[in-house]
């Protein structure tokens, strides 16, 4: 199965809630959405008296992502969110425009499942694991909080970047980021029971972790990590044309194999300016076209999800779906050519001209006119009959 969807609430959606966006995507014929968790506004406070004895996940109008009594607080755990709160426990809540509390996430999850819209969630874009200790801790927490929301939404992926390389040797930075991804994946597997996996996508800038080789190697070495095929970022980083099936097919196969047999991809147009300088554009205006990708994906034997990260969101998602359906039709026509030419059409006899008489005189039911009727033949006179002149006298 293949799914198409936007990276965020559709632009044409009248309502701006997440459930409105899911419903709108469904009505447009789309079956996927990547929820954008971009801004993080955390608030850590002590449990209030009226909250004591209640599970953290049941608090109304409180989007709780972390609870506990440890100082500093450890990573979020499911028991801490489900067990009754105690005095002097701490809570971390988020202010997010797309959900008010965890019960709100449950309703959104149920709606997405009812409408068959597959959800994933993208964590905040800016992370830094090689800055200060505070920046490192904040980056780790942002990915974990995004994963808590993904689990509440029923999303199967929490997608993220891993940030800049360190100031030392690049190999050492890759090794340390691999260990961070290992810790995050292990925590996420325990928190969600394996329902949510960590998606790592490549970066278009050479100073940020995420070359094609690094992402694929990370997915091979770390259990639970899914490589995300972000084609605009790869095109910007590698400066290679992706307009030929021979170039694109091996790349797609590498990501499918490393992800365990399916494909999760992001696509949009892209304009390249220089080393690490690019801009995402609508598909029709960018240097990267979807026609070749549609041909490659049409030949697939695996499940795939393609997310539109274009500024036009759902418009380009529907456009990609249209190009894919055209490629699929060409594939079907190629594999099922007509076996014999169709028979020539049968010519129908022309109707008789208006006013023309019948072809056979006896077949006509028209009564003859007065001039056409035969005149009666006069009776012949015979001897011994008639008037007095012909009558014999009997003497």
Image (spheres, helix red, strand yellow):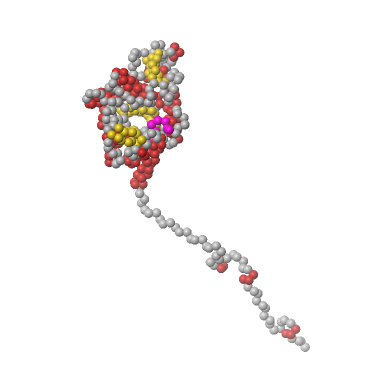
How far across and down, in percent of the image, does residue 270 sit?
33, 36
Decide if residue 47 is on the left or right side of residue 394.
left
How far across and down, in percent of the image, does residue 168 sit?
22, 23
Q: Is residue 151 above or below residue 342?
A: above
How far across and down, in percent of the image, does residue 311 sit?
38, 34
Identified at 72% across, 85% down, the residue is 390
Among the 4 quarters of the image, the one containing residue 374 = bottom right
Q: Is residue 339 visible?
A: yes
Q: Quadrant of the N terminus?
A: top left
Identified at 45% across, 19% down, the residue is 60
Instruction: Name the residue nearer the viewer: 296 or 271.
Output: 271
Q: Is residue 190 visible?
A: no
Q: Is residue 306 magenta?
A: no
Q: Residue furthest right?
A: 395
How far across and down, in percent of the image, does residue 326 sit?
38, 43
Identified at 39% across, 37% down, the residue is 316
Q: Quadrant of the C terminus?
A: bottom right
Decide if residue 146 is on the left or right side of residue 350.
left
Q: Is residue 266 above or below residue 129?
A: below
Prevailing secondary structure class for the magenta stretch in the rendered image: loop
Instruction: Name the residue nearer the viewer: 49 or 187.
Output: 49
Identified at 36% across, 33% down, the residue is 309
Among the 4 quarters of the image, the one containing residue 195 = top left
Specify the segment rendered in magenta. Answer: 4-11
């Amino acid at each position: 199965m293949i799914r198409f969807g936007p990276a965020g609430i559709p632009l044409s959606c009248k309502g701006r809630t997440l459930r409105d966006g899911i419903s709108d995507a469904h009505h447009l014929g789309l079956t996927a959405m990547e929820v954008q968790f971009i801004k993080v506004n955390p608030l850590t406070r002590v449990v209030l008296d009226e909250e004591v004895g209640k599970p953290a996940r049941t608090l109304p109008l409180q989007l709780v992502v972390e609870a506990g009594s440890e100082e500093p607080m450890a990573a979020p755990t499911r028991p801490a969110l489900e067990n009754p709160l105690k005095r002097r426990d701490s809570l971390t809540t988020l202010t997010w425009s797309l959900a008010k509390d965890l019960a709100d996430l449950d309703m959104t999850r149920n709606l997405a499942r009812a409408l068959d819209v597959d959800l994933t969630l993208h964590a905040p874009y800016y992370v830094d694991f090689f800055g200060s200790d505070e920046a490192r801790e904040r980056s780790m927490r942002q990915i974990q909080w995004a994963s808590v929301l993904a689990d509440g939404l029923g999303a199967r992926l929490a997608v993220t970047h891993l940030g800049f390389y360190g100031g030392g040797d690049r190999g050492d930075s890759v090794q340390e980021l691999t260990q961070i991804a290992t810790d995050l994946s292990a925590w996420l597997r325990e928190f969600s029971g394996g329902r949510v996996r960590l998606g790592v996508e490549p970066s278009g800038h050479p100073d940020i972790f995420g070359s094609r080789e690094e992402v694929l190697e990370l997915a091979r070495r770390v259990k639970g990590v899914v490589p995300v095929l972000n084609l605009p970022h790869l095109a910007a980083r590698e400066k290679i044309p992706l307009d030929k099936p021979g170039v694109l097919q091996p790349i797609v196969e590498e990501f499918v194999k490393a992800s365990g047999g399916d494909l999760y991809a992001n696509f949009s147009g892209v304009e390249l300016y220089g080393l690490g300088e690019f801009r995402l554009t609508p598909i029709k205006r960018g240097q990267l076209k979807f026609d070749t990708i549609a041909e490659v994906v049409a030949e697939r034997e695996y499940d795939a999800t393609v997310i539109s990260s274009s500024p036009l969101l759902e418009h380009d998602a529907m456009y990609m779906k249209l190009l894919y359906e055209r490629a699929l039709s060409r594939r079907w026509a190629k594999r099922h050519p007509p076996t014999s030419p169709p028979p020539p059409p049968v010519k129908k006899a022309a109707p008789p001209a208006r006013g023309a008489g019948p072809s056979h005189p006896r077949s006509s039911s028209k009564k003859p006119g007065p001039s056409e009727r035969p005149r009666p033949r006069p009776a012949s006179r015979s001897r011994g009959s008639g008037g007095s002149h012909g009558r014999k006298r009997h003497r």
